[in-house]
Image (cartoon, grey):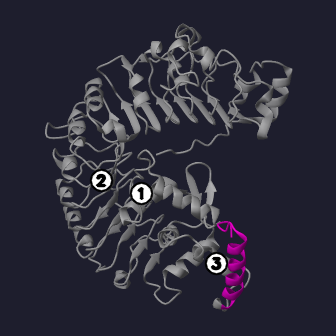
Amino acid sequence: MACKRTPREWNHAIKVLHNSASNFPGMPEDVLPLLKFSYDSLPNDIARTCFLYCSLYPEDRLIYKENLVDSWIGEGFVDVFDHHRDGSRSEGYMIIGTLIRACLLEECGEYFVEMHDVIRDMALWIASEFGRAKDKFVVQVGARLTHVPEVAGWTGAKRISLINNQIEKLSGAPRCPNLSTLFLGINSLKVINGAFFQFMPTLRVLSFVQNAGITELPKEICNLVSLQYLDLSYTSLRELPIELKNLVRLKCLNINGTEALDVIPKGLISSLSTLKVLKMVYCGSSDGITEENVLSGGNETLVEELELLVHLGDLSITLKSSSALNKFLSGKSWSCTRDLCFKIFNDSSSINISFLEDMKNLDVIFISHCSILEDLKVDWMRYRKETVAPHGLHKCFHSLHTVEVDRCPMLKDLTWLILAPNLRHLFIINCDSLTEVVHKGVAEAGNVGGILSPFAKLERLYLSGVPELKSIYWNTLPFHCLKQIHADGCPKLKKLPLNSECDKEGGVIISGEEDWWKKLEWEDEATQRACIPHLRSQSYSTPKLR
């Protein structure tokens, strides 16, 4: 009913709802008709199909919005971007919003949704053609399976989900002439027989996410000629087989978190000419790499191959040297980059990141394991009071909402963060020399303090293993959106930039070692009274972003 807007729509909806009750014999009269009515009232068939797809995920468990949209792209339900909205991947998220407003999905924070078990049961019932074709959607999630269930019944299956089991081996050669989606994520897979994929001519979506036992893929995966979405993220793959180049229809490839990956053959990435989404954050170790490999060096060869992907519209990438960064910035793939990771960078102690202002689609930056990196520079003259627009910093890093800095032992500060006005999540981990998050002298020398409201949209601040940290910011800040601060291993951090207004709208949860927060100094007694009820001992859950 939430989708109805006019009295005429409401009157018609009430009549339909009354008439629908008789269609559900033996079902709770006051529940299922309402849910089925919400489904029928969705604006179009695409929204209805996307809703049914959600039933492939575990009940009452968080569903990552981005993975959901990517699988819809693979199935062909939505496109990568809406060209009328600055290239954003908005169509899929608009459908998610529609399902939330119809109360068919529940939003769980910024990144996740979940589906209630009753709604999921209804979705599976509809997907099985109201019980007449139960083998159409084969869903056995969280069923503690150790083997793939009997494959003889897969002949009529269109979508199969075996998420969150303990399956160790894929064997046999199931005949699946109509199968379009196969979810095998969060299992214990170690062995994948090549024959398993022999008779899946229509498979479009295949996910092996979070199978740490997978170290190799069979060459026969190239038989999946219809495949458009392949998720290998957070596996232990050591090499991508060159045969993947035969997946000529592949639109989405996710190899995020494949840190054991040492080999991506030359020419493989560039041969995937239909790729629209490529995710490669925390991909590859860079040690012991052969010459015929795009992961050699600082990923310069990889950057060259990306330039040949003319349809690429959504990129997440790791760069490992300043030479790779320079090559990246001289091309065009930076314009569609959403997640950017700087890792290792052994050839430079300084990176000028002023280019971030031109990356209009950049959401997330990871800076990791940069052992000699001392400084992240910006051209402060570009942001001085007299050079900016009257209504704000038009040259800021506006799209950036998440920054994670991990194991950068030489960094002293992160003052450049004041140029990210929409920053919502900040993680600083194991940075031995960091003394200030924002350096007062640098900010004042840049003459930008009077036109900035630092961290105005910050929601979460996570600090761990930053032993020299003394200051986050030299003055108190309003923190209109802040929900959580966590600090451990920060013994020199004696004061937080909070004032008495931090108690508004539920207050700011402050967690850390009890000895630390007992010694905190407060701006005044009112601030202390406002904050003390929200102190917690080490109780902080770090969200997994990618």
Q: Which residue is mark 1?
A: 70
Q: Position of residue 471 (x, y in %)?
A: 63, 17
Label annotation for residue 182: none
- Viewer-nearest of labels 3 and 1? 3
Counting residues from the start of the chain, the first of labels 1 and 2 encountered is 1
Name above or below for residue 285 compared with residue 5: above
Q: Is residue 61 visible?
A: no
Q: Mark 1–mark 2 contact, CB under 8 Å?
A: no
Left or right, 171 with respect to 186, comes to left
Nearest the viewer among 304 and 169 is: 304
Q: Which amino acid type is marked by label 1?
A: Asp
Secondary structure at badge 2 equals loop
Q: Position of residue 5 (x, y in %)?
A: 68, 66
Q: Which residue is mark 3?
A: 37
Left or right, 27 with respect to 406, comes to right
Name above or below for residue 222 compared with residue 355: below
Counting residues from the start of the chain, the first of labels 3 and 2 encountered is 3
Left or right, 161 with respect to 193, comes to right
Is residue 175 found inside the magenta-colored segment of the image? no
Q: Position of residue 235 (x, y in %)?
A: 36, 52
Image quadrant in which you'd find residue 8: bottom right
Label annotation for residue 215: 2
Q: Which amino acid type is marked by label 2?
A: Thr
Magenta stretch: give its range: 1-22
